[in-house]
Amino acid sequence: MKLPRKPYIALGLLMVLLSLGYMNRLYLLQYSLGWYTDWAHPRSAPQDIAWTAGPPSAQVPPAQRPPNIIVILADDLGINDVSLHGGGHGGEGVPTPHIDAIAKAGVRFDQAYAGSAVCTVSRAALLTGRYPWRFGVEFTPTPGALARVAGTLYTDPSKIHPVLVDHEKAKATASFDELGMPASERTVAELLKDRGYHNVHIGKWHLGSTPEMRPNNQGFDESLFMESGLYLPEKDPRAVNSKQDFDPIDRFLWPNMRFGVSYNGGKWFEPKRYLTDYFTDEAVKVIGQNQNRPFFLYLAHWGVHTPLQASKEDYDALPQIKDHRRRVYGAMIRSVDRSVGRVMQALKDNGLDQNTLVIFSSDNGAPGYIGIPDVNLPYRGWKLTFFEGGLRVPTALQWPAQIAAGQQFAQATSHIDITPTVVAAAGGMMPTDRPIDGVNLLNALQHTSGKSAAKALADRPLFWRDGGLRAVQVAHWKLIESAKPAKDFLFDLKSDPTEKKNLADTQPAKLASLKALLAAHHKGMPEPLWPSFIEMPIMIDKTLNLPQNKDDEYTYWYN
């Protein structure tokens, strides 16, 4: 008996589709995260946010209230991306006058360190005043989809050192949303809430996306949450894109990132315009709505993180920069600096500029994978390394009512100091039921009244940790301990601030004492909350687009 023809045709088509799917499985995997996002989180048109309004009139004059507090955090902004220290891209027509103005009105920190050389860990340090590995946050949350395609994305015969992917660990890792800071941590927002502050988060979070880990459960009354990573839709006429074909991370981001935010955990919607400007628009509204009560605003920009994407308006303003990539990057810096200026103007317009403590910083140094060599000059290294280029960040503070203008603070400070400083300014207390690693910097600064003389910080070690890569800095000595390659880097930062001369072989006593300090600090620390499943070599002195040779120094980064 003859079977009908149609089932054979259907079966044949199915086999063809399966064959095509198998042959293009890596392409499908590379794009799967974006497709899943489109299905799980359809984005609506832009929405107006009804920010919660404070009292219609001031019960207490601004000068007599606890200070308003604003922390503005840039993303991947290198110390040489701003003109704060006399460098930057000013020669290309991209100065940062508004960031610089915070330091002129207050304090420039000349040896400010990030909590880590990567975003999640650094942000956890900033928001708690604690080393994040104390509560298991050691690695960057990474989508499992990246592990499935990493081996192919990173296949490059010209690279000397391999990227190592542990697929079994990747499979065992929780979903991306579940990787973040435990709700048991006491954030700066929770501590300020105890003092009666209204707390608002705008922008990047990257500390977990479950309801327990999101800002609204971590002390923030309101949260405008960046849900993905495009500044505008890729083909939007308002955008100018720069794609780095030599960077596997960039090739993964473009097809998978989307243009979307949410408010207080609601459904995703598209911002009204270029992301940096949009976040600034909303920050200005928040300041106006809260002019009559103490507030804390955590403005966590995505700029200038990849994918490199500028607004056409900023790109067109820099015709003197001929290199397309540098021009897009410069335009992104321009938008971040403009944001700072608009926030400061909003404070002035609302009569709040004198009694508002403003801190500006970046979460870590700029990366080498964007292919721009001078972003961290004069320092060596990039984001993902513990050399100074990965850890030194532009940092400035102002509080005109209390802190004298024009100060330059030379001692080493860290992101772990921000929460203790902010809480002290608000008249609060840090938790006593857990170790606090940061210190209150206010007593180390000259006060406007002149009644309080600045006191030098006591020498203290600062630590960093990322799997097989660890570091400690105390006084002017710094040790980087690398497991892969098995190598110690010892530097005297006083005589060699750019880390050119490794003294590990010539200073055995100093090396031994710092190694003992490192071992004592890390002894008894808990296991990471999630494993590292990608190990990636990072060249210390070369951007990713440059050819490698066997004499290049490198360390491995653990995701």
Image: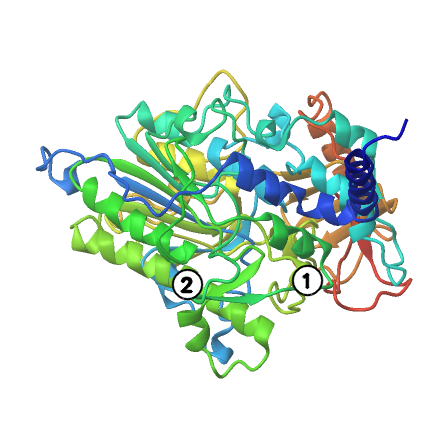
Farthest-out residue, front = 1
Q: Position of residue 38 (x, y in %)?
A: 54, 41
Number of callouts: 2
Residue 206 sits in quarter: top right
Left or right: 205 in relation to 32 = left
Q: Residue at x 37, y 68 (%)?
A: 97
Amino acid found under the numbered disc labelled 1:
Thr
Left or right: 540 in relation to 311 = right
The colour mode here is rainbow
Q: Residue at x 34, y 29 (%)?
A: 192
Label 2 crowd bin: few (<14), some (14–19), many (20+), radius 10 Å: many
Quadrant in the picture for the C terminus = top right
Left or right: 289 in relation to 32 = left
Q: Is residue 470 visible?
A: no
Q: Position of residue 392 (x, y in %)?
A: 58, 54
Q: Position of residue 198 (x, y in %)?
A: 27, 32
Label 1 crowd bin: few (<14), some (14–19), many (20+), radius 10 Å: some
Circle 1 sits in a helix, a strand or a loop, which is it?
Answer: loop
Amino acid found under the numbered disc labelled 2:
Ser
Compare marks 1 and 2 and give the one earlier in the sequence: 2
Disc 2: which residue: 335
**Could you tell me how far apart the alpha carbons at marks 1 and 2 are, in whole angstroms?**
29 Å
Disc 1: which residue: 498
Quadrant in the picture for the N terminus = top right
